[in-house]
Amino acid sequence: MNVDRLIGTHDFLFITLDTLRYDVAEACLEKGLTPNLARLLPDGKWERRHTPASFTYAAHQAFFAGFLPTLDLPGKQPRLFALNFAGSETTGENTCVFETADIITGFADRAYHTICIGGVGFFNKQNALGNVLPGMFTESHWDTSLGVTDVDSTENQVRIAIDCLAKLPRSQRVFLFINISALHQPNCIFLPGETVDSTITQAAALAYVDRHLPPLFQAMQQRAPVMGIICSDHGTAYGEDDYHGHRLSHPVVWNVPYAEFVLPRIDRSQANTL
């Protein structure tokens, strides 16, 4: 995909499904628990990719520098986005190259309004560290209703995102980023009666997320055609080989689901049928 050809005509949507494991995403897809995400996936499948980092802060710093998850294949892989620096071996002829320190500022320099809807603690704006990632954006939002302990977090994130879009003229191009917090621990809150996180409770959390994303896609498509990226930033271990959590080296942490797609602009009458 040549992203440069889309800049100026398309809005951009980047969603990270924080902590979502690839195997959980695949299992949910096979069981029909994520029909709304399934409609977005090229060929109806997640790509299995390798994340550049094993926890949220490091992964997003890499993402925002243009280092998105890479295909689970050997060899050098050209990137969608890059920052201009000498010696880059993965900047190809179709790579969108920015002359900035991060891609968010790069979009802003090309007249995009950049929005961050935070989720997990690294986006909470409550301290210096929690302001680093949101601070890259023109507009950023976070409160506890968007965080990991709120059972309505995705609904709240989508509502705020739609409100932000509604305040902008349709002619204003937008780069919207959302860090979905529901998959992160404690995801057992999405399965009544459960008190311990597992692949089963993460699957319940993903099914919840899937139910509440369609209004966001509709709101964006009513503004302009959309280039979208949805992926996990890292997985997490639930006891595999005696590992628990993330910020560690294990395949369940490094393997993440990834999808990129382009959605057409729609009018209001079409939106009601989606």
Image (tube, rainbow, N blue to C red):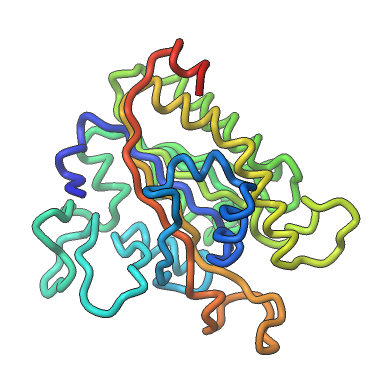
Left or right of residue 175, residue 193 in this image? right
Expressed as whole percent of the image width and height from the top left, the position of residue 162 reads 52, 27
| Residue at the limit of the structure toward the top, as seen here | 269
Expressed as whole percent of the image width and height from the top left, the position of residue 228 reads 37, 43
Identity of the residue drawn at 70% across and 75% down: 238
Figure label count: 0
Identity of the residue drawn at 47% across and 18% down: 271
Q: Nearer the viewer, residue 266 or 98?
A: 266
Left or right of residue 227, residue 96 in this image? left
Expressed as whole percent of the image width and height from the top left, the position of residue 217 reads 47, 31
Expressed as whole percent of the image width and height from the top left, the position of residue 254 reads 48, 75
Q: Which of 64 and 253 is in front in this view?
A: 253
Q: Nearer the viewer, residue 130 or 197?
A: 197
Q: Is residue 126 above or below residue 171?
A: below
Identity of the residue drawn at 55% across and 60% down: 26
Q: Nearer the viewer, residue 181 or 61?
A: 181
| Residue at the limit of the structure toward the bottom, as seen here | 241
Q: Is residue 11 above or below residue 149?
A: above
Q: Which quadrant would residue 144 be assigned to in this image?
A: top right
Q: Which quadrant would residue 51 be assigned to in this image?
A: bottom left
